[in-house]
Image (tube, grey):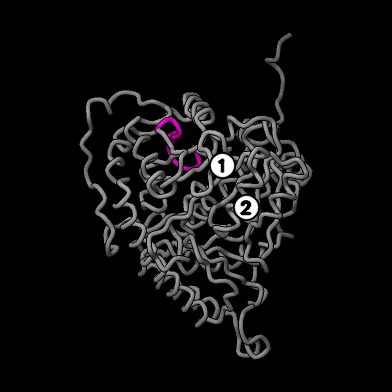
Amino acid sequence: MSFSGRKFSTTKDKRSAELKSNIHRQFRNAHEGHRPHAGLDPTRASTGVVWCTERANEHGFQDDPESWSNLGQGAPEAGDDIDGSFQRPKTLEISVNAREYGPTAGIKPLREAIANLYNAHHRKGKDSQYAWENVAVVPGGRAGLIRIAAVLNNAYLGFFIPDYTAYNEMLTLFRNFAAIPSPLSEEDEYHIHPDKIAEEISRGVSVELEQVCRVTHRDQAQIQDICRDRATLIMDEFYGGYNYTSNCDGTTISAADNIQDVDEDDVLIIDGLTKRFRLPGWRVAWILGPKEFIKAIGSCGSYLDGGTNVPFQEAAIPMLEPDKVSQEMKALQKHFKSKRDYVLGRLKEIGFKIKHVPDSTFYIWLDLSGLPAEINDGLNFFQKCLEEKVIVVPGIFFDLNPSKRRDLFDSPCHHYVRLSYGPKSEHLRTGLDGIERIVKRYVTSDFTSRRWMFV
């Protein structure tokens, strides 16, 4: 049978009659196979913070990033001018061994250094200690989460909303588990409580994905007791060093404190150099867990990501000396707490009411609902910020919706934006100046007399 004379409905140069036809557009939107690029799912091409950056690029951000205030960035400042912080390497000496393929679970000396760090900071005096076989090195946090997802059994995986935007894609890539959302309450400061975990397990959830900064230390111990022998707990600890609850003494928050047996407790801890060591460009992260889990996680790197850059692994080893890390965490906490207090103070001066002061991370969840209608939702506020060369992230991106079953414009996160105080202080200052200009432009004296502060 010959197809040489067949006419296809999709061509590279669509006729003007098709372009003007509502029914053609409706058909294309409803049938993915009839899109201009039939093999592309465009919803996976631009997500969360990336989408915001792309919109900023349309306004010139990419051409001149230094003239912008990127308060949307999910990364800390990476310079060497924080008091008390050790100097990062500016050059690397690359060994002959580093020219070769590295093990997909990471080089043994780095795995040993990571195990030693956690034993010194979180396992002191405990019988069960991490060994190098309890550690897998991975090329960044997303790669680590994807490796974990790849080795999970058929399961219901519980996650909480609002949360990290990149979880959304990780939760849809694999068919070996079904992602079950559980909303958290603003009135409760979006904290995760033990009874919430018990409820999730009672309805069949056998894997829980949790951010360590969402839980008090006492509740974390109870949550791990509840999950023990019942569920696998995935602990995202990238912000564990940004802890402002202990007078900036360098204490790092980790589920490793509460583990009874490192090979029996189903707790997978993921962290790395990205956030608390302020080296997001190095793409060096790690997972700690039972040896059996780690063996599988290391092996699946061979078909997922190929492993972590070996020269950067070698350079990371001296950074992880426990006393050095403790001093680094003290410097980090003092610096970022100071920036947090500055940003909160400016927002209050502008007129925003801050309901909850964050005691970890470097983000502020800003409520816009008291502003005039033109700017009281995340997307419109984001658009106005772009005009001032300021980037924020609309709140709806944190209302994770991996199965696309909900209309996000009805989301409780729609009237929020996330502000980052990760950037340098001068960018925080100019970014808040831009936000103040937006508010002054839209908030009239009549409006403020009716609504004194932005709730």
Depicted 240 relative to depicted 454: above or below: above
Residue 142 forms part of the magenta stretch: yes
**x, y percentage for residue 25?**
73, 43
Residue at (42% x, 65% y) in the render: 69
Q: What amino acid is at disc 2?
A: Gln
Depicted 293 relative to depicted 374: above or below: above
Find numbered disc 2 in the image and state the secondary structure of the residue it sits on: helix
Residue 426 forms part of the magenta stretch: no
> Which quadrant, please, contains the N terminus?
top right
Which residue occupies the extreme top position in the image?
1
Front-most of residues 137 and 429: 137
Relative placement, left or right, of 323 versus 294 is: left
Residues at marks 2 and 1 touching, judged by CB atoms closer than 8 Å = no
Residue at (69% x, 41% y) in the render: 179
Query: Residue 94 is drawn in which quadrant?
Result: top left
Relative placement, left or right, of 420 versus 159 is: left
Find numbered disc 1 in the image and state the secondary structure of the residue it sits on: loop
Instruction: Find residue 45 and name its label.
Output: 1
**x, y percentage for residue 274?**
41, 48
Residue at (47% x, 24% y) in the render: 302
**x, y percentage for residue 273?**
38, 47
Magenta stretch in the rendered image? 132-143
Q: Nearer the viewer, mark 2 or mark 1?
A: 2
**x, y percentage for residue 41?**
63, 37
Front-most of residues 259 and 453: 259
User: Which residue has dot 2 on it?
Assistant: 222
How many tags in the picture?
Answer: 2
Q: What amino acid is at disc 1?
A: Ala
